[in-house]
Amino acid sequence: MTLEQLRQQIDELDNEMLGILNKRMEVVKHVGELKKTTQTVIYRPEREKQIIDRLAEMSQGLLTRPAIEAIYLEIFAVSRNLELPERIAYLGPEGSFTHQAAESRFGAMSDYLPLPSIRSVFESVDTGRARFGVVPIENNLEGIVKETIDLLNETDLKIVAEVVIPVHFTFATKSEKLSDIKRIYSKDIAFGQCEKFLNEYFNGKDEEFFVQVDSTSKAAKLASQDEQSAAVCSHIAAKLFDVPILFDNIQDSSQNRTRFFIIGKDFVNQKSEKDKTTIIAKLPDDGKPGTLVRFLQEFENRGINLVKIESRPVKEGETFNFWFLMEFDGYFLDENVQHIMKKHESDIKWLGSYVKMV
């Protein structure tokens, strides 16, 4: 078979897919109209995961689960925008890893609002200027994002979903040769996480050669304006500012991952096959030793798997008291979870139950 014949086959298949997608969108339109009459939330992460799980299980061809997920997350995003366009706030600037996490769930068509701080993302969702917000919660190498935890405690917003993305840095430049590069722009943490690559290619350069800026997005923007420079940045930032990528995946660790929360107001997910729940526990100081130990023992007694516990200081008062952010497997309406939540109703703040990704 000739190349031209193969291309003709592809064109015919594309025509069929376009017709099927248009039919799907017609059904989506009716779903949107029904949801409007019943005041139902458009974004349903548990339903999207259910569809991807089903398709990945039945796939008999070359498409892997990650490929199916990538294709259908974009289809879901287009579908949601047909049902009801929604604004998504995220910790900016454009081209940040948070931007990448937001697009991975809401697609390229959504209305995005980059904001300068995590607090401003929370405020935009709380006031209704954005339907959802995307904020970082932890990096597996750098640890927890304390500001996000504190704001979950201070506000009444809920966790809608979690998103986990690999942190891949690229080396982007408009220079034709490495020897032409006079400076490299990036954020301090990115320089630190790409130390092996930088030592291998730029060993012996003085500190002024490595220019620290506020974000990897800004690094890409500066590199786009300076042909004698380069940027250590995200793939999305290099693409956004049209800076050619010379080297990809230059980070020291291939296991670098960042987890993000999608936050919303007055949002409750339906139960899925695999859920995680996040709560804040403020245990009473009754003067008796072992208060936290006894509380944790209740989870084991009820067969609940705790996956994370983080302590944060109580800022009121003069004593050294703490509250705890806790994550565990299960849905908040599960019988064993409800037993603990009702028993400690005055001590627990429920932040959300959502599809477990890690």
Image (spheres, helix red, strand yellow):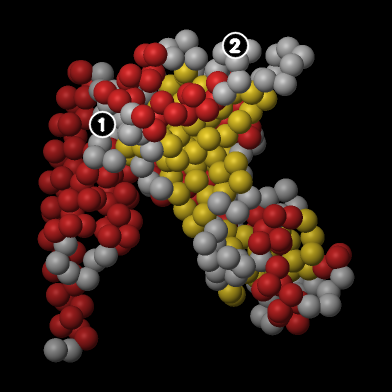
Q: Nearer the viewer, residue 178 or 19?
A: 178
**Quick one: label 1 or label 2, which is nearer the N terminus?**
1
Residue at 66 percent across and 66 percent down: it is 194
Q: Position of residue 35 (x, y in %)?
A: 21, 24
Q: Residues within 10 Å of mark 2 (few under 14, many from 20)?
A: few
Question: Is residue 234 depicted above or below 102 in this figure?
Answer: below
Q: Nearer the viewer, mark 1 or mark 2?
A: 2
Residue 255 position, x and y percent, is 52, 62
Q: Quadrant of residue 205?
A: bottom right
Residue 330 placement: quadrant: top left
The circle drawn on residue 80 is: none
Q: Residue at x 34, y 25 (%)?
A: 337
Place of residue 3 in the rendered image (x, y in percent of width and height, measured from the top left):
21, 86
Query: In the picture shown, does residue 226 fall above or below 109?
Result: below
Disc 1 designates what residue? 271
Q: Amino acid at mark 1?
A: Lys
Residue in the foreground of this view, choosing between 338 and 182: 338
Element carrying mark 1: loop
Q: Secondary structure at mark 2?
A: loop
User: In this view of the protein, which residue sits in the foreground, 259 or 323?
Assistant: 323
Task: Point out residue 39 in the picture as x, y percentages from the top left corner.
Answer: 26, 18
C-alpha distance separating marks 1 and 2: 35 Å
- Which residue is at 14% across, 58% downward? 58
Residue at which label 2 appears: 286
- Amino acid carrying mark 2 in the image: Asp
Could you tell me which quadrant the N terminus lies in? bottom left
